[in-house]
Image (spheres, rainbow, N blue to C red):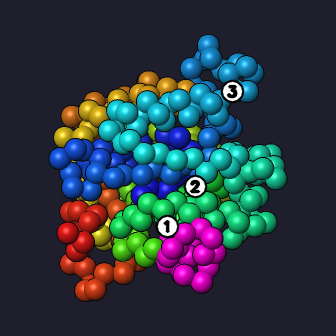
Amino acid sequence: MAVHAHPDDETISMGGTLARYAAPASTDSDVIVVTSTRGELGEIVIPERDTPEEHARLGETRMGEIAAAMAALGVQHFENLGYRDSGMDGDAGNDDPRSFHQHLLTDPDGTVAPLVRLVRTHQPHVIATYDDFGGYGHPDHIAAAKIARRAWELAADAAWRPDLGAAWSAKKLYEVRIPDSIRDKTLALLESRGMESWWSEPKDAPPEELEKWRAWRAKMACSDDLITTKIEIAAQMPAKRRAIEAHATQIRRDGPLLALSIDDVIAISPYEQFRLIAHRLDAEPTLPESDLFAGLR
Ligand SMILES: [Zn+2]
């Protein structure tokens, strides 16, 4: 089970891994993607579609896009928790009482309950989500990381909300990470081609702002030695790319995610990378791993 914030995050962060485990040949074919919001406050990157009418139905549009992305990845089962997108950190959407961020602040147990129900119903062995910073500090990503961790605990607690189903103890909990080395290689290749990305240092920023920006960028990646698990996804890269393209309103065709070719991306690294942050295995896992289900087969 993968727990995410908005449609597109699942594909960008771990689409290859989802495709790999969802493949019919895989013995772990029951992959479930859970998205917390419909991403209705995202930007629309196609200029001619960046209109008030398109924004008013962006949630529906993005649900259609994730359906197409899941088809590309071969994932048959995806769920949406129905919270409202909170917008970027500091946006007015953060204060909207319908937002995921506000729900979690005002009713933490109620907010995690639908995810606990899904965990108890579908009984995943592995749960994967973001690190505490939600990858890049977006309030919905931080909230998704929080409810995934809470659901890992609460779903296993038979005394907690028995109305949501019989207790289920998932065996492994992961956060998806980008190691510093991959960030540096990706940034170098993009810059060598004259392309800016979210990792490119802002030009002409005052020193104070630059320092803040550098601290933020440092939190978006992690030291390579924190990685416990590398999933090889070279064979899944074409499917991942089709799924990225399916998120058409969110991901620029000429932006960093699609500007590099599949061969470029594989040359940088043919892996998606994870950190095992909790487990309930009988024995300590042997690390590093190349399989999220290591120790469970
Ligand atoms: Zn997101």
For label 2, being within 8 Å of ligand 1 is answered yes
Residue 120, numbered circle: 1
Q: State which tag comes first along the sequence, 3 or 1.
A: 3
Magenta region includes residue 157? yes
Q: Answer yes or no: is residue 292 visible.
A: yes
Q: Quadrant of residue 231?
A: bottom left
Residue of label 2: 141
Relative horizontal placement of residue 69, taking residue 227 as reference (left or right): right
Residue that appears at 56% across and 63% down: 117
At label 2, the amino acid type is His
Q: Crowding at label 2, few (<14), some or many (≥20) Cα neighbours within 10 Å?
A: many
Question: Is-magenta flag for residue 211?
Answer: no
Q: x and y percent of residue 217 in the render?
A: 51, 55
Look at the picture and state if 128 lies above or below 246: below
Assign a secondary structure to mark 3. loop
Q: Nearer the viewer, residue 207 or 266?
A: 266
Q: Quadrant of residue 178?
A: bottom left
Residue nearer the viewer, 135 or 207: 135
Q: Magenta stretch?
A: 150-167
How far, Cα to Cα, is label 2 from label 1? Answer: 22 Å
- Residue 16 at x, y percent in the picture: 30, 45
Relative placement, left or right, of 90 versus 226 is: right
Name the residue located 61 percent from the left edge and 51 percent from the top edge: 81
The answer to whether the residues at label 3 and label 1 have Cβ atoms under 8 Å apart is no
Badge 1 amino acid: Arg
Q: Is residue 276 above or below residue 245?
A: below
Residue 233's disc is none
The numbered mark, 3 or 2, whose residue comes first in the sequence reads 3
- Give the farthest residue toward the top: 48
